[in-house]
Image: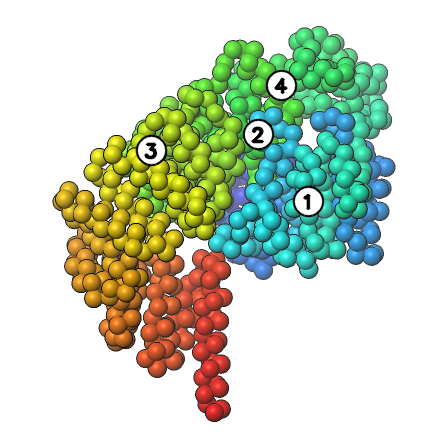
Amino acid sequence: MGRTEFGRLLREARQRSLLTLESLAEASGVSVRAISDMERGQSLPRQATLSELMDALELDEDERRRFLEASVLRAEGPAGRVPRQLPPDLAVFRGRTRALETVRELTSRIADRGGHVVVSAIGGMAGVGKTAFAVHWAHHVADRFPDGQLYVNLRGFEDAAHPLDPAEALGGFLRALGVSDDDIPRGTEKRGALFRERTASRRLIVVLDNARDEEQVRPLLPASTGCLTIITSRSRLADLATREGAQLVGLDVWTREEALAALSARIGEDRCRTDPKAAARLVELCGHLPLAVAIVAAQLSAMPQLPLRVAVRDLRGAAPLLDALSAGARRSDVRTVFSWSYRALPPETALLFRHLALHPGPSVSAAAAASLAGIGVPEARRHLRRLASANLLSRDAEGRYVLHDLVRVYGVELVEAEQDDGLGARTRLLDYLRHNAQAANRFLGITVADEDVPLADGAVSVPLGTREEALAWFRQEEATVSSALRSMDDPRLLRFRMTLTRDWVSYYSLMGRWSEEIAAKRIGLDAAVRLDDPAAVIQNASHLARALAETGQAADADRHVELMLGQLHRLGPVERAVTERTVGWVRGRQKRHDEALHHARNALEIFRALGDDRAAAREMNAVGWYLALLGRYEETIELCEEAIPLLRRDENLRIEAAAWDTMGYARHRLGDLGGAIADYQESLRVYGEAFDDYNRAEVLEHLASAQQEQGSRDDARASWLRAAELLSTIGSPHAARMRANAEALDASGASSEQA
C-alpha cells in the first residue's frame, strides 16, 4: 500500500512538472530505472534519494509532507529494524584499483573464516576521498551483511565543532538497532557494552568516518566476528593495528591516470579526448586531489561549451592563492580551485555558501540553512541544489546537506574577509532552533514558556501538525543544537543559549536522554549565572537537579538544590513557590521524604496565599503523596478528597488522575482493597482521557497488586498484561517486568493447583 501510494504521488508530481523520466533523473541525480521502479510501486526511496527527488520537483511544504508520509511506511515491514545509514554511493566513483583489491580480500576473510576486520583508510590531507572510498566499499559488499549498515561522522577534524563524543555516537547506533531511548544507559562504557551485546550475533557494516584518534574509535567497535568495521581518519591509528588487529589501508591523492578517468566520468570522455593536454593540466592544477577534481568537473559540467584550455586559463588567473592551508603547493592549488568555483556562483548562492560556513553542526537542513541566510526555504533549496551540483556540498543518508570541513574553512575565510562576525546569522539560527522547539513541544503536551517571544526576522517557522512531525524535527536538529551550545560562546548570544536549553530540555527528558539533558542544562545554567538572572538560575538549576536526581547523582543534585535555595530571597512569590515545589520533587526522588514534604507544604502555603487554586490543588497531590510515603495515609486521603473537585473544575486531567492514584495507594496500604481498586480504576479512566499511556501503565501495576491481594488472579493477570501492552507501544523497557509479573502469577497458580 505504501509503495503504491508513493508511486502514484511521484508520477503525478513529475507529470505536473512536465518532466520526463530522463529529465527528472538528470535534475535529481537519481537513475531513470530507480525512478521507474518507484512509480510502478516496486520500491521506495531512501531518505537522501527522497530529498533529491522532492527538491528536483520543487514541491511545496504540503506536497513534501505527503511524500514523506507515503515513504515512511517502509519502516513498518519486518525489515524496519534493519539500519540503512550509509550515505549515497558516487555513481562516478573511479580509481583506487589497488586499494579496492586489498579491501575486497579483507572482506572475503569475513565470509571465509568469520574474521572481524577493522580497516583504517587514511590520507595525507583532507579531500583525498577517504569517505567516498569507504562508502563505495560498503555499498559494494552490503549484500554480504544482511543485518544492515551503521554510519557516523565522528567529526574528528572539523574546525567548527568538537569531535563527536563516543557516547553520543553509541546512542545513535543503539536507536538505529531498535533500542528504545528509555533503555539506553548513561555513559560511554555502559552504552558500549550494550552495543557489543546487540551486535554480537549480527552481520553488520559499521562505518566510522573522520575519526580523530584510537580512543574515540574503540568504544564503537562491534563484537561480532561477522561485522565489517571501516574507519577513516587523517591520523594513522597505528595503535588499532597493534592492539585490535586492524588492517591499515593508505590512500594518497589520485595518480594522473585516475584523476583523468574521474574527470572524464564527470564531464564526458569526448570532451577530454578533444583536448587531452588541457585535461591533464586541469587535474594537475587540482593536485590530483579528488575533492578538487570533483569541484572543477562540476563547474565544467555547468558550462558544456567552454573549451578546456579556457578553463585552464581561468583557473590559473583565479583569485590570489590563500595561505590558510599552505603546507605545500598542492594545497594552495586546491584553494585556488575553491575560489574559481566560488566566483562562478550567482551572488545569492554565494551568500548562502558563506552563511553555511557558520553552521556549527555536521550537517544542515534546508530550514536551518534558510534561517542562517534570512531567506525562504524554497529559495534556500534552490541555492543548496546549485551548491551540491558544484560539489561544494554533499548529501547524507537523511538528505541533509554536508559541507566538507576543508570547504568550510574556505567559507569562514570569505566571511572574515568581509569583516562579518556572523552575529546576525547565528542569532537567526539559534532563534529558529528555539522557536520551533517551543512549537514542537506543544505537540508533545509540554508548555515550556508562558511568554510568546516573536520569531527573529528571517528565521524559519517550520509547519508542524502532528506529534510525529514534532519528534522528527527534534531528531533532525539535535546534532545542530548540541554543536551550537558547545561552540557559540559569543557573550552576545548568552540569552539565546540559555533559552535554547530551556526549550530543548523537554525533548531530552521525554526521550529519557538524561546525559544529553544534563550536558545542555549545565550550559544553560552557566549562561544564567553569567547573566545574573535569578529566575533563569532557578529554572536551569531545577531542571538540572531533577535530571541528576533521576540518574542517582545525589551529591551533584544537592549542590544545585543549595544554589536554588540561595536565590529564594531574590524571587517573587510565584517563583518561590515553583522553586519549593521543585526542591520537594528532588528530595522525593532522593527518598528524603520529610524534606520533600516540608518544601511541598511551603509551596502549597504560598499558592494558597496568592489565591491560585489551580496551582494549590496540584500541590495538594504532591503533599498527599509525600504524606503517604511517610505512612500518614488518613491525611493523604483527606487532602486528595479536597483537591480532586478543584482539579476536575479546572480540567487538570493528569493531576486529577494522579490524585486518584495517590488516594488509591493510601487506601491500599490501609487494607481497604475495594476502595483502592475503585480509586485506581477512576485514575485509569481519567488518564485515558488525557491520553497518558505511561502513567496508565503505572496505575495498572498498582491495580494488579490490589487485585492479587483480593484474590482476583485473572483480573490481576489482565491488568499486568495490559500494562505491558501499553509500555511496549511506547517502547518502554519496563514492559518485560509487567509480563514477568503476569507469568509469575500463572506459575504460582499452577503450583497451587498441583498441591
- The image quarter containing residue 702 is bottom left
x%, y% of residue 142?
72, 49
At x 15%, y 47%, the residue is 608
Judge whether residue 282 can be spotted in this image. no
- The image quarter containing residue 357 is top right
Name which of mark 3 and mark 1 comes first in the sequence.
1
SS at circle 4: helix
At x 78%, y 20%, the residue is 287
The residue to which callout 4 is attached is 410
Front position among marks 1 and 2: 1
SS at circle 3: helix
Q: Residue furthest bottom?
A: 755
Judge whether residue 630 can be spotted in this image. yes
The residue to which callout 2 is attached is 161
x%, y% of residue 327?
74, 17
Taking the image as shown, residue 201 lies to the left or right of residue 592, namely right
Q: Nearer the viewer, residue 370 or 652?
A: 652
Task: Determine contact: label 3, label 4, CB under 8 Å.
Answer: no
How far apart marks 1 and 4 lie (CA) works out to 32 Å
How far apart marks 2 and 3 lie (CA) works out to 27 Å
The residue to which callout 1 is attached is 218
The residue to which callout 3 is attached is 536
